[in-house]
Image (cartoon, grey):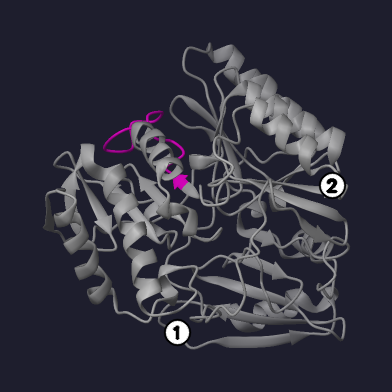
């Protein structure tokens, strides 16, 4: 199964932000060693087929041709020329991917990618997704959210509820919705507005404490204190609610293969080539859903068995992972060299070479080119960190156990170091 993200990472610490939010978007490009970078928010990871084609054209015409998936089900275009911002924004706006210039960086919403496709959830979260996105774009206050603030809409199966979002809405068995922060049950019809209220409460709390904060975890408040503020604001807005303990459940993404009325594929290291993206758009006669586990779900409602089998084989032939036992499901990496000036190594190439030797690791591996550890998971995993001397430092981060570490002078010694801390 794809990597699950559960408890906070040992590397994550509350931060005081002394500068403005520099998180990239479509209208604010980030300068990298391989050119400018644009991050395109796709609420829930949902794309129509026409939107997918428009993204592919933009990547080929303006960038390096590839589409880079993020841990929030969004897409990054890399290798952009510094002067292409206006052309990119125009192309994405025409495709319906830029509904509000003032809110484009705050539309971070993950949603259960199989919702409504496999019968595994308690309700289809697509109406919630549409309503929350519209509410965010209509909220003047929401413009103050950082580009890292995250909403999660869980259909009850517990997949995205474990991703450490700032605001989570999860379907309950009695037809309602559980909301955090606040740990309350609200009516299903009120869930999108309740999520917005929780986010606006966060903003108000951050201002009252005179701090520039990007995530709920950075507030100088306990969960209980923030919960009380959320409940008070829900009451003021006329949203009925009742205390409800946090639901339990394991969080993991869709397994590759045929899953209900959908095809599921994993994208090695989250990088889709033009050929792979074209194959996905051909298979996506009813759209695509990008997952926070760097995978893609292709709905197949109404497709014949022969078409489904053919599509799966064509996707496999491009290098996309369709086998649930593939070791690629347990390996991730930041962009590394040559795309990032701060990276100490080409971690993606090293990860690929090491995988041939290690095979399917006991714990998920995440390779980082520097101490920032961009995109690292927050669940149990092995942190493989490149060091300035050309080596790596490995740390096994597992819940309930002390940190175990080992060093490797180079990629060839990773296998031995990994065995030392996981055996």
- Tell me what residue is drawn at x 35 percent, y 46 percent: 154
Q: Residue 80 carries which label?
A: 2
In which quadrant of the rendered view does residue 127 lie?
top left
> Of circles 2 and 1, which is in front?
2
37 displayed left or right of 406 = right
- Tell me what residue is drawn at x 48 percent, y 59 percent: 144
Local crowd size for mark 2, using a 10 Å CA cut-off: few (<14), some (14–19), many (≥20): many
**Count of all numbered marks drawn on residues in the image:** 2
The picture places residue 42, in percent across and down from the top left corner, at 56, 40
Q: Which mark is residue 82?
A: none
230 displayed left or right of 393 = left
Discs 2, 1 touching: Cβ within 8 Å? no
- Looking at the rendered image, the quarter that the C terminus falls into is bottom right
- Judging depth in this view, the residue of 390 and 93 nearest the camera is 93
Gap between marks 2 and 1 measured at Cα: 43 Å
Residue 395 in the image: above or below residue 297: below
Residue 422 in the image: above or below residue 157: below
Residue, disc 1: 401
Q: Is the magenta stretch mostly helix, strand or loop?
A: loop
Q: Does the magenta stretch include residue 115?
A: yes
Q: Earlier in the sequence, mark 2 or mark 1?
A: 2
Residue 263 in the image: above or below residue 231: above
Q: Is residue 132 magenta?
A: no
> For the residue labelled by badge 2, is the local secondary structure a helix, a strand or a loop?
strand
The picture places residue 276, in percent across and down from the top left corner, at 75, 33
| Residue 362 seen | yes
The picture places residue 150, in percent across and down from the top left corner, at 46, 56
Direction front: furthest residue: 140
Numbered range of the magenta stretch: 110-124
Local crowd size for mark 1, using a 10 Å CA cut-off: few (<14), some (14–19), many (≥20): few
- Judging depth in this view, the residue of 272 and 311 nearest the camera is 272
């Amino acid at each position: 199964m794809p990597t699950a993200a559960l408890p906070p990472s040992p590397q994550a610490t509350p931060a005081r932000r002394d500068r403005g939010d520099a998180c990239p978007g479509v209208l604010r490009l980030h300068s990298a060693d391989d050119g400018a970078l644009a991050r395109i928010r796709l609420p829930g990871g949902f794309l129509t087929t026409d939107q997918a084609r428009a993204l592919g054209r933009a990547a080929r015409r303006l960038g390096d041709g590839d589409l880079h998936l993020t841990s929030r089900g969004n897409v990054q275009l890399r290798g952009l020329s510094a002067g292409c911002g206006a052309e990119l924004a125009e192309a994405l706006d025409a495709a319906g991917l830029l509904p509000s210039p003032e809110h484009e960086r705050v539309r971070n919403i993950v949603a259960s990618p199989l919702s409504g496709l496999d019968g595994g959830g308690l309700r289809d979260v697509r109406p919630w997704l549409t309503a929350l996105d519209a509410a965010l774009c209509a909220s003047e206050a929401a413009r103050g959210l950082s580009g890292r603030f995250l909403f999660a809409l869980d259909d009850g199966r517990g997949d995205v509820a474990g991703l450490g979002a700032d605001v989570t809405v999860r379907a309950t068995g009695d037809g309602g919705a559980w909301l955090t922060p606040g740990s309350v049950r609200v009516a299903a019809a009120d869930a999108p507005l309740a999520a917005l209220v929780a986010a606006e409460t966060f903003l108000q709390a951050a201002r009252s404490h005179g701090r520039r904060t990007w995530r709920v975890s950075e507030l100088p408040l306990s969960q209980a204190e923030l919960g009380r503020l959320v409940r008070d604001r829900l009451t003021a807005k006329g949203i009925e609610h009742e205390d409800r303990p946090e639901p339990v459940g394991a969080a993991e993404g869709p397994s590759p293969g045929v899953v209900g009325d959908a095809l599921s594929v994993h994208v090695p290291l989250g990088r889709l080539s033009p050929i792979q993206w074209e194959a996905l758009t051909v298979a996506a006669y009813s759209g695509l859903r990008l997952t926070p586990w760097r995978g893609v779900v292709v709905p197949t409602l109404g497709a014949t068995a022969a078409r489904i089998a053919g599509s799966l084989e064509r996707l496999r032939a491009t290098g996309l992972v369709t086998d649930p036992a593939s070791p690629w499901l347990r390996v991730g990496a930041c962009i590394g060299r040559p795309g990032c000036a701060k990276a100490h190594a080409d971690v993606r190439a090293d990860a690929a070479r090491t995988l041939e030797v290690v095979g399917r690791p006991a714990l998920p591996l995440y390779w980082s080119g520097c101490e920032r550890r961009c995109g690292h998971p927050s669940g149990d995993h092995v942190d493989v960190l490149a060091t300035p001397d050309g080596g790596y430092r490995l740390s096994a981060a597992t819940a309930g156990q002390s940190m175990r570490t080992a060093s490797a002078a180079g990629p060839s010694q990773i296998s031995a170091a990994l065995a030392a801390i996981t055996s």
